Image (tube, rainbow, N blue to C red):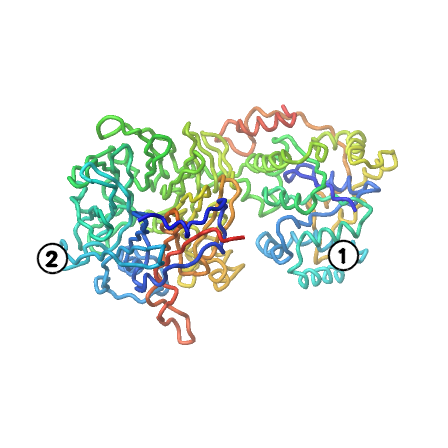
Amino acid sequence: MGIDKTLVTPRIPRPMDRDDFRCISKEGFGDGWNHYAHCMAWFEDHLYVGTSRAILAMIKVNDPPPALNHWPINSPEDVYDIDRRAHIWRYNPRDESWLRVFVSPMVEGRTGQIVARDIGYRGVAVYQGPQDTKPCLYVCTWSSSKGQPPTVMRSEDGLTFESLPRPSWGEFVNTFRTLVPFKGWLFTTPTGSTAGYGKAQECVGSAPTIYVCKDPMSGDWHEASELGFGDPHNLTTFEMHVYNGYLYAGTINAEDGYQIWKTDASGDPPYTWTKVVTHGAYRGKLNEIAVSMCELNGLLYVGSGIVNGGYHRLAKVGPAAGEIIRIYPDDSWDLVIGNPRLTPDGLKFPIGHMGPGFDNFFNGYIWRMFVHEGTMYVGTFKWTVLMPFIPLEKWPDSAQMLVEIRGVDELVSQNAGFDLWSTIDGIDWKPVTLTGFENQYNWGVRTMASTPYGLFIGTANPFGPEVAEKTDAGWEYQHNPRGGTEVWLGNPRET
Amino acid sequence: MSDPLILLGPPRSFTSVISAMLGQHPQMYGLPEVHLFVADTVGELFFFYKITGPRRTHGLLRTISEVYMKTQNKKTIDLAKAWLIKNKDTSTAEVFQKIVSKVDPKIVVEKSVTTVWKPANLQRVNRIFPNARYIHLTRHPRGQCESMIEALKTETGLTREMLDHSTNPPTTDPQILWYNIHSNIVNFLENVPQERYMRVKGEDVIQDPDTYLREMSGWMGLRTDDEAIEEMKHPERSPYSKLGPPNAPFGNDPKFIKEPALRPARAKVLSLEGPLSWRDDIPGFTDEVKEMARLFGYE
């Protein structure tokens, strides 16, 4: 099946603005518990979207939970009372139709309880292993605390998915998010762990190791790096990206700030790695995670964040907004968006002329960055929508001052919902939307895919099916028609 | 109607006194800090005032009062404020152009420190006034930074732009502000035709006002006779050089308003080398600061 050229109008690429985007799916594909469109891939002329389920319900039962006055969505005390089976959806842009191609099976978990095997699909890659006759879809699964450790799924046709042997990570690992093909190998790394019900660690894997495999069907995974690159403060390798002939990997480090390492993957694993950036680009632990990476015009951009969306409750890091740096082929770097500072690598001030979070305190992650037709689009995670539920006296002076100036209602109505920015050079930035496409519940841009049919964006929106609304009688849960993940498609309109 | 003359420089770089001196030229009109280049509309400007503090409104209110009502008192300031509120959808470009046309044929001199905060603000000047002229005022980083540290003892709200975030907690270091603002200016002026800008050391103007005021006036194509230069040496005669009415007393650097008269002084000999009086955890100025300072002719 070829590309429908009537739908792919030749045009001069230009950065898109708000009016170039339209919503093609809402309310979690009709199920408000589909909270995140967690991964996307373009495969054999279709868009594939993996969902993650009941995120806010899961956070509610985790320890320590966020200190909220009232829980924002209606969710049961036992998260297992919810249907947590994750979905994979397929979109056909030619007839604009969606098809649910996969639903997680129910399996016997580690406690004997029958549970959803996969509560989310957090990463996906198109890869051809030695036993594959063509490129196939490989999907990262996310399992619940009572489930079995996660594994890799494979599909040849996008309709049937098989489970492959999992990497040799420990039983505490419950999720991974990166699958990066490089030099004929597939790399991954655990990015979440659990020590039992309510004891999951978001983003933090139990073993900070990178795994590599030439043939995922064989399950012959090897360790590609030493634990934490030899630094016990590196809790996890969180994000990876191929750039300039190397595989770059970014860590979570709650003590000193993230590190960026690279390898050319020569020889047999484990490989030799070289440190490129340290101490969170000298911002320290406020740049706790290297969350996102993207190459634009021969430079590697790295977005940062703090675990839990801007405030790492367990490690007490933050709150603070994310930054962006860019790395040059010679491994020097510049600050793009962030706070100025003196560093051993020179005086850095933001060449994009904005402070952390694009000058917005609430942008806790620079979550996703993607290039489409020569323009880089950067989406954030922004937690302003939680402001009505937050006991403000516990927050820093800067946040309290902002609330005093603008008021909670104005903040939410004018500021809630993710930011999406565009740039063609990393210096000049233009906002596409600063309000989650006018949906305060779209608190993040979680995934993007550049395709011949346009730029697809999948949102993180955990505010379905029922959200707390303030009424004269107090908080009441009501159906939320804008809750649940949305998918948007951007195409430059005719001008 | 001539496009204005815009002074560009970091705070504590003699911008207030030199702007007021230029504004006293018989063919020029010096404004206080009106901050019109930080926003596209008056409504957005109000939001900027809300965030950065009400004192930033004073310059524009005093200007409207003085230019339109030929006086500044509590009542005229209230009228100016009411006019702005009523015209919140008006573009800042239109407001500025009204002021320019009102004082025509005099050339407006403007020096709001906020103009150089962000490249977008400088680009806004260029869009509104494509034929504007610019004077880039410099000051030795040691002198400017020590003056900033002194200012911090009495003024609040200045620290954010000069924090070094590599330490925890962040360390106040004005060289960051000095470098950031001069970088913005240098990068902006790279795309401005050379005949429309000049770079002047503030210390030179203070030390030898006759020579440099005459040079700047000549570059502007204005009178350079002794009478004009003598008038320029009295910045205290500007209607904005003293405290304004109680509802808009400032509009300029408080230190300048306190002592607006020109006090010619021999510039201290300062060095780019050696320790910094405001922090001892680094050996001195960064290489970037020293390199840029040398570009401006400092040792």
Determine whether the residue tagged by mark 2 lies in a helix, strand or loop: loop
Residue A314 lies, in percent from the top left, at 31, 49
Chain under numbered label 2: A
Along the line of sight, the residue nearer the viewer: A168 or A243 = A243
Tag 2: amino acid: Gly
Determine whether the residue tagged by mark 1 lies in a helix, strand or loop: helix
Q: Is residue A448 above or below residue A341?
A: below
Residue A328: quarter of image: top left
Q: Are marks 1 and 2 in contact (CB under 8 Å)?
A: no
Residue A244: quarter of image: top left
Q: Residue visible at 21% across and 62% down? A: A80
Check disc 1 and report the residue beneath it: B65
Along the line of sight, the residue nearer the viewer: A29 or B181 = A29
Give the number of the mark in front: 1 or 2: 2
Chain under numbered label 1: B
Is any atom of residue B241 visible in this view?
yes
Total numbered circles: 2
Residue B273 lies, in percent from the top left, at 57, 24
Check disc 2 and report the residue beneath it: A112
Distance CA(mark 1)–CA(mark 2): 80 Å
Tag 1: amino acid: Ser
Q: Residues within 10 Å of mark 2 (few under 14, many from 20)?
A: few
Is any atom of residue A235 visible in this view?
no
Q: Which mark is residue A420?
A: none
Residue A336 lies, in percent from the top left, at 48, 39
Along the line of sight, the residue nearer the viewer: B78 or A75 = A75
Q: In the image, is B209 to the left or to the right of A292?
A: right
Q: Residue visible at 15% across and 44% down? A: A165
Q: Residue visible at 75% across and 62% down? A: B75
Asked if marks 1 and 2 fall on the same chain, the answer is no
